[in-house]
Amino acid sequence: MTTAQRTLASGSGWHVSDVVCTAAAGDRPFEEEHRGFCVAAVTRGAFRYRTRQGTAMLAPGAILLGNPGACYECGHEHGAGDRCISFHFSPAYMERVMADLPGAKRLGFADPRLPPSPALAPLLAEAEAARETGDGGAFEELGLRMAGAVVAAAAGSSRTTRTPSPRDQKRVAEAVRLIELNADRPLSLTEIADTTATSPFHFLRTFRRVAGMTPYQLLLRTRLHRAAVRLRSSDATISTIAFDAGFNDLSTFNRRFRREMGEAPGAYRARISQMR
């Protein structure tokens, strides 16, 4: 088996798993079926996801969307492995969520993914911190919030119409892994583009079309996400966390963190401490 699943928490009509895939470029993808609604947050790696809603490349911060009974296939033709926090909801559970959301009219996802967005960033950091610290009790509330946030975001999303070419998928997957491995150091667009043997302009357009964001946005979100997880799960100073994440000065980190997470790092940590 190339996929290992570990249940993090479960309840009536829902469960959440830590899913680690070790599939590599030579492994043949196989078809699976969603038994319920699936909302999976990608926390590491990149892979191709194909289902009846369409085909999309998923990178860290993106949300995989699956409907009950839908067959799907995940491929790693251009790189090895990924990791996701996978929320699964029954139709009855999702119906209850939608009943409390104005404007949500359709039970089911029209698109295969949601691209990374600042609106979901704090929630994803909270989920990953709960996974890393073993706080299974947090997932009942997290599941409800995740379901509501994703349904609301999906209701306003535009349908994916273009399937990325195998060559574009390969270039983006390679770039995602380069960014993940080197997020704590300066990384220019030219350096990333050079690894894919394309011009920076062409690479930027390709990456944005396939991944739903720019390389720099992924770099910043990777740094900020890792910092948010450490703020929740460690006692390291804010300056240490900022420098370890790849920021050169504390003021830049504070400004970026506030923009992405909605509050300053100190306020974020203090609020989390009060909730424990």
Image (cartoon, rainbow, N blue to C red):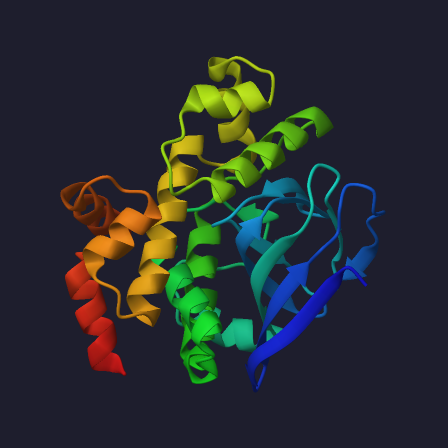
> Which residue: 42% across, 41% down?
183
**Which quarter of the rendered picture does the C terminus lie within?**
bottom left
Looking at the picture, tell me which residue is in the foreground, 104 or 262.
Answer: 262
Relative placement, left or right, of 41 versus 36 is left
- Where 98 sits versus 205, above or below? below
Let me know if residue 102 appears in the view.
no
Q: Within the image, what quadrant is residue 3 found in?
A: bottom right
**How many numbered circles are shown?**
0
Q: Which residue is rendered at x = 44% and y = 32% of the image? A: 215
Q: Is 59 on the left or on the right of 274, as rendered? A: right
Is 67 in front, or is 252?
252
**Drawn side of residue 169 relative to residue 229, left or right:** right
Q: Nearer the viewer, residue 114 or 25?
A: 25
Query: Which residue lies at the image location 58% right of the left edge and 60% below the top edge?
Result: 84
Percent x, y for residue 10? 57, 83
Q: Is residue 30 visible?
A: yes
Residue beneath the point at 63% across and 65% down: 19
Q: Quadrant of the N terminus?
A: bottom right
**Residue 265 against residue 182 in the figure, above or below:** below
Q: Position of residue 85 (x, y in %)?
A: 55, 64
The percent position of residue 211, horizontal first and vertical second, equals: 53, 36
Q: Nearer the viewer, residue 23 or 244?
A: 244
Q: Is residue 268 above or below residue 248?
A: below
Q: Percent x, y for residue 64?
A: 58, 54
